[in-house]
Amino acid sequence: MYDLTPIGYTVRDPEGRLIQFLRPVTDSEEGADTLPRARMQHFGVRSPDAGALVEFYASKLGFVVSDRVLDKSGALTAAFLRTDSEHHSMAIFRAPQVRFDHFSCETAGWQELRDWADHMAAVGVDLAWGIGRHGPGNDTFLMVKDPDGNLAEI
């Protein structure tokens, strides 16, 4: 299913998720900044058939597979796909059920990450993980959970 709109398009993937792709927003279109900046960087989903989902996003939508993680038997456990020069725009993790995993927004650096942590504390949102440092890439991050338990990474 494809639905074109003036701001982008929406796709329903084989597992029923609606994924919306939006055109870039310029600074002049954004409202007054009251929070530290963080651009959408990637999102992750869970799937019992990660291979089929990777095939859909790569063959039907043109995503490029950056990395695959295999278990000892050679079965796919995770895949990272990209739409531009960054390592990944999407992560797919093998899991027993179809569900959203997380989304990640990127800040300009350590000071902005600190500002986000301060903001979360000020509004009563506990950190679910971090502030920490990822092994690959050595980048710093924090994660919070939304009311439904979904993870948001900055």
Image: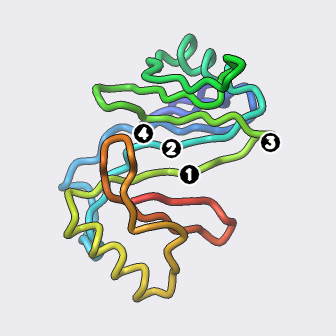
Residue carrying label 1: 102
Q: Earlier in the sequence, mark 1 or mark 4?
A: 4
Q: Earlier in the sequence, mark 2 or mark 3?
A: 2
Q: Position of residue 34 (x, y in %)?
A: 28, 76
Residue 3 visible to the viewer: yes
Residue carrying label 4: 22
Q: Quadrant of residue 1?
A: top right
Residue at 75% across, 31% down:
15
Q: Camera-side residue: 88 or 68?
A: 68
Residue 52 visible to the viewer: no
Q: Position of residue 108 (x, y in %)?
A: 20, 57
In the rendered view of the protein, which quadrant contains the C terminus?
bottom left
Please report contact status of discs 4 and 3: CB closer than 8 Å, yes or no. Answer: no
**Helix, strand or loop status at disc 4:** strand
Please report contact status of discs 1 and 4: CB closer than 8 Å, yes or no. Answer: no
Residue at 18% across, 55% down:
28
Residue carrying label 2: 43
Residue at 39% across, 46% down:
135
